[in-house]
Every structure is written in structure tokens, then in C-alpha cells.
Amino acid sequence: MKRFLWPLAAFIALVVFLGVGLRLNPREVPSPLIGKPVPAFQLTQLLDADKTISDRDMAGQVWLLNVWASWCVSCRQEHPILVEFAKANVVPIIGLNYKDGRQDGADWLAKFGNPYRVSAFDSAGRVGIDFGVYGVPETFVIDKHGVIRYKQIGPITPEVITDKLLPLIKELNRA
């Protein structure tokens, strides 16, 4: 009888782990960067290769970093929502054009609208790697002190803006 209890116990444990795993939201993957300073970066701007953008340019303000690419299907879904959100001027949105061609990214913004105060050009994806990006789109909320407070994996939706971004941005602006 004992020899049947061990496999039964292992099976029950496996079912419990599977049940817990199925209830988790894959968009809420915890990032090891939450609560840590934004990785230092300085990149050329997508639309003006003679100018740069760095994390230091955003010091003292709450801001969003939105990682996007012209080849990204989900970015196309997210883009009109970002354009509308940018019109509200709640927070500066900085783009990180990730592993893309400069002209492809510029054409994308010309065609679909530009929600970004400025978009950095990360053709090799090195800055994206520093941020722990493993797919686009991804969006980071960064506080006045340059600390990452939230990471959205996947497209921004109106619900994400209403339920997560706006309350967090208001809280960080008060701090």
C-alpha cells in the first residue's frame, strides 16, 4: 500500500502546481528591475540622428518608456491607444525603437502618428536587453528619481491605462 502513496502524493502535488500556474496572468511576469534604477542609456534619436536621448534627460519627472518596433504586430494594436493617451499630456512618453530600421521606424510614426516626446533608436537591441525586454511591446513607468515602478508586458489597453497607469502616475507625481 505504501508504494502507491508516493506516486499518488506526487500526482496530487503536480496537479496543485498546475492549477496554480493556470491561474497566473502571463502579462504580470515580475521584473527583477522593479524598484531599481533605470539602466543608464544614451542613444541617438530615431527622427534626428544628430541628437541623443538619455535617461538623464528625464530626471525629476515621472515618465513612460514604451518599447516598440515597426515589425511588431502587437505594437500596431497598441499604437492608437498610445496616440490618444499622449494627447492627454498626463506623462511624457519616450519611445524605444527596438531592433528596427531607422527609416522603417520613421515611416511607421509618419503613417500612424507619433505619441512620443522623442523616440530613441536601439537598432542592436542593447538598451532593450538592459531593460530585460524579451518581446515588444513593453512599457515601463519610471518615477522622478529614475526608479522603475511598473512593467507592462504586451500591448497597453484602455483598461491598463485606467486601472494601472493613471493611478500609479498620479501617486508618483504626488511623491
Image (tube, rainbow, N blue to C red):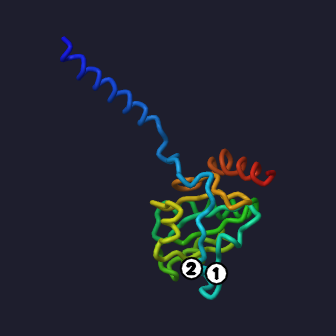
In the shown orientation, is residue 107 left or right of residue 173? left
On the image, the x and y values in percent for residue 120 come to 59, 75
Q: Is residue 169 visible?
A: yes
- Which label belongs to residue 52? 1
Total marks drawn?
Answer: 2
Instruction: State the separation of the CA atoms marked 2 and 1.
Output: 16 Å
Q: Is residue 133 above or below residue 27?
A: below
Residue 156 sits in which quadrant? bottom right
Q: Are marks 2 and 1 in contact (CB under 8 Å)?
A: no
Q: Nearer the viewer, residue 87 or 94?
A: 94
On the image, the x and y values in percent for residue 121 come to 55, 77
In the shown orientation, is residue 79 left or right of residue 4? right
Q: Residue at x 76, y 51 (%)?
A: 170
Q: Is residue 14 above or below residue 25?
A: above
Q: Residue at x 65, y 68 (%)?
A: 94
| Residue wearing tag 2 | 106
Q: Residue at x 76, y 64 (%)?
A: 60
Residue 146 sits in which quadrant? bottom right
Residue 81 sits in which quadrant? bottom right
Sequence-wise, the earlier of marks 2 and 1 is 1
Kind of element beneath mark 2: helix
Q: Is residue 76 visible?
A: no
In the shown orientation, is residue 17 left or right of residue 89? left
> Dividing the image into 4 quarters, which one contains the N terminus?
top left
Kindly identify the amino acid type of the residue bearing the numbered disc 1.
Thr
Q: Residue furthest top?
A: 1
Q: Is residue 121 above or below residue 87?
A: below
Q: Residue at x 81, y 51 (%)?
A: 174
On the image, the x and y values in percent for residue 35 come to 62, 52
Q: Residues within 10 Å of mark 2 (few under 14, many from 20)?
A: some
Kindly identify the amino acid type of the residue bearing the numbered disc 2.
Ala
